[in-house]
Image: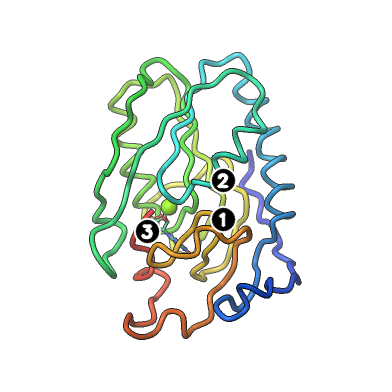
Amino acid sequence: MSNAVRKLTSKAKVPVRWRQEVARVLITDRMLAKRIAELGRKIEKDFAGRDMVVVSLLNGTVMFIGDLIRQLSHPLRLDFIGVSSYGKGTESGDLVFTKELRLDVKGRDVLLVDDILDTGRTLRRVLEKLCLLGPKSIRTCVLLDKPSRRIEKVTADYIGFTIPDQFVVGYGLDFAEKYRNLPFVGVLKPEMYSSPKPKPTAQAARKKK
Ligand code: IMP
Ligand code: MG
């Protein structure tokens, strides 16, 4: 699949209950549903007849993975890898695996799914780890891509939306473990990042999956 850049044109109003904290909606629930259905169709076609294992990274994919695999009608296996970063403000390079893969991926076709591809450190580390397990193939799928922040040479085969360098929350993505339950992807008001924590750069704010 080509890494098509998606134009983000949401003019949706922030729902009243989130208005104190969220500055704007970047991707609405309808945009998410539509794009995930498209991704599902492509993935289904590409993996037809294969021995598919979906490996999803916790915690950020909590919503995306449920919606994505419901679009896939052929048999598949699903497992999770837990990844998080050390402490506050730590770069995503310092990864800790909080849950290991249990399924055997040897000789199987893996779809590795993450919420967002940012510096690329997470995907690169996980890809290295998965490769050692001897899968037949690995493809990668991310809901969001921030190519402007890339440090590692890693790309995703399936991309939901390409976004600018902004820290986003919602639909599984968090800031300090909050906001995962927003049904849309949005941008927080600057004051949400302040006191007692310093306003994060997009980099410092990503601390946990
Ligand atoms: P990486 O920099 O590509 O390794 O991304 C590391 C992780 O940081 C991602 O899987 C997310 O969990 C998190 N992350 C990166 N950018 C954002 C963001 O804008 N919002 C929330 N989490 C993010
Ligand atoms: Mg994540």
Q: Which mark is residue 195?
A: none
Q: Is residue 202 above or below residue 51?
A: below
Could you classify mark 1 by the number of other residues whose Cα lies within 10 Å: few (under 14), some (14-19), or many (20 or more)?
Answer: many
Split into quadrants, the picture shows ligand 1 in the one at: bottom left
Mark whose residue sits in front, 2 or 3: 2
Q: Position of residue 157 (x, y in %)?
A: 55, 39
Q: Position of residue 10 (x, y in %)?
A: 73, 67
Query: Mark 2 = which residue?
Result: 64
Q: Is residue 105 above or below residue 155?
A: above
Going from N to C along the chain, the mark reached first, 3 or 1, is 3
Q: Are marks 2 and 1 in contact (CB under 8 Å)?
A: yes
Give the quarter of the figure containing the N terminus: top right
Q: Are marks 2 and 3 in contact (CB under 8 Å)?
A: no
Residue type indicated by callout 3: Ile
* C-alpha distance separating marks 2 and 1: 7 Å
Residue occupying image coordinates x 49% and y 31%: 111
Which one is in front, 83 or 39?
Answer: 83
Residue type indicated by callout 1: Tyr
Mark whose residue sits in front, 3 or 1: 1
In the structure shown, which secondary structural element does the residue marked by tag 1 occupy?
loop
Ligand 1 within 8 Å, label 3 CB: yes
Q: Position of residue 38 (x, y in %)?
A: 72, 40
Could you classify mark 2 by the number of other residues whose Cα lies within 10 Å: few (under 14), some (14-19), or many (20 or more)?
Answer: many
Horizontal relation, residue 173 to residue 126: left or right:
right
Horizontal relation, residue 122 to residue 2: left or right:
left
Residue occupying image coordinates x 40% and y 52%: 120
Q: In which quarter of the view is residue 42 placed?
A: top right
* C-alpha distance separating marks 2 and 3: 24 Å
Q: Is residue 191 above or below residue 41?
A: below
Query: Mark 1 = which residue?
Result: 171
Query: Mark 3 = which residue?
Result: 151
